[in-house]
Image (tube, helix red, strand yellow):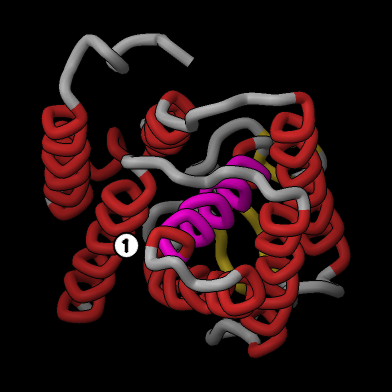
Amino acid sequence: MNLYPKNKISVFEVKKFIIIFYIVGTLGFLIPFTKDFFIAITPFALILSTYLLALYHEKYTKKTIFVFLLIYLLGFLVELIGVNTGLIFGNYKYGSGLGLKIYETPLLIGINWLFLAYTSVSILSSYKLNSILTVIFAPFLMLIYDFVLEQVAPKMDMWDWQSSSVPISNYIAWYLIALVFAGFLKVFRINTENPMSKILLLSQFVFLFFLMLFFKIQA
C-alpha cells in the first residue's frame, strides 16, 4: 500500500510523529480545558493509528484480507453479544468515546481487536519466537494492555462497568479471544512484519499508563 506518508517520509520521521502525537494526546487528556475535545477525537486517533499500521503492512492478499475481516467481524460480534447480554465479559456499557455504535456496540471496537492482535503477534514474531509460543504469549501482551486500559476507559468515556471493579471474567474472556485471533494470524501464516507495530503499541500503552497514574493520584 503506497499511500502517504509511506515512501514520502522516512520511517524514522513517521515514528517520531507517532511519539509526538501520543505525547500531545496525553497532555490533552490531562488538561481539564481540553479533555472533552480529546475524548471527542479519540475515534480518529484510533483510525489514524490503524491507518499507519495498515500502510506499512507489506503484502495484501485475498487470504490476508479475509483474516483481517474475520478478526474484525468476530471482535465486533463478541462485543455486541457481551455488552447486550453480560455473558462474555460481565456487565458493562459503552460511552461515546469510541464513536458510532450499532446495538450499543462501537463499530471501531472490532478494529481495536484487530490492531491489538496484529501488533502483539508482530512484536513477538520479531523476536523469532516459534508460532506456538507466539500464539500463547501474544494474548498476555494484550491482557497487560487491557488491564491498564480498564483503569482509564471510564475517564475517557469509552465504557463503564456496572460493578465497582472489573470482573475476572473480563480478563479470562480477553485472553481466550486474543488467543483465537493470534491463532488465526499464525495458522493462516499472515506476515505481520511491520516497522510500525512496536512503536504504535508501545506509544498507546505508555499513553494509557500515564493517564492511569494521573487519575489514581487525582483520586
- Residue drawn where x is 72% and y is 29% of the image: 65
- Residue drawn where x is 70% and y is 71% of the image: 179
Horizontal side, residue 5 vs residue 86: left or right: left
Query: Measured along the vertical axis of the image, is residue 78 above or below residue 53?
Result: below
Q: Position of residue 26 (x, y in %)?
A: 18, 51
Amino acid type of disc 1?
Phe
Horizontal side, residue 90 vs residue 216: left or right: right
Horizontal side, residue 41 vs residue 164: left or right: left
- Frontmost residue, 212 versus 35: 212
Q: Which residue is mark 1?
A: 205
- Residue drawn where x is 56% and y is 65% of the image: 160
* Classed neighbour count for the residue bearing mark 1: other residues with Cα under 10 Å, few (<14), some (14–19), many (≥20): some
Quadrant for residue 164, please give it.
Answer: bottom right
- Magenta-span inclusion, residue 112: yes
- Magenta-span inclusion, residue 206: no
Q: Where are the magenta residues, as a range?
A: 110-124
Q: Position of residue 45 (x, y in %)?
A: 37, 34
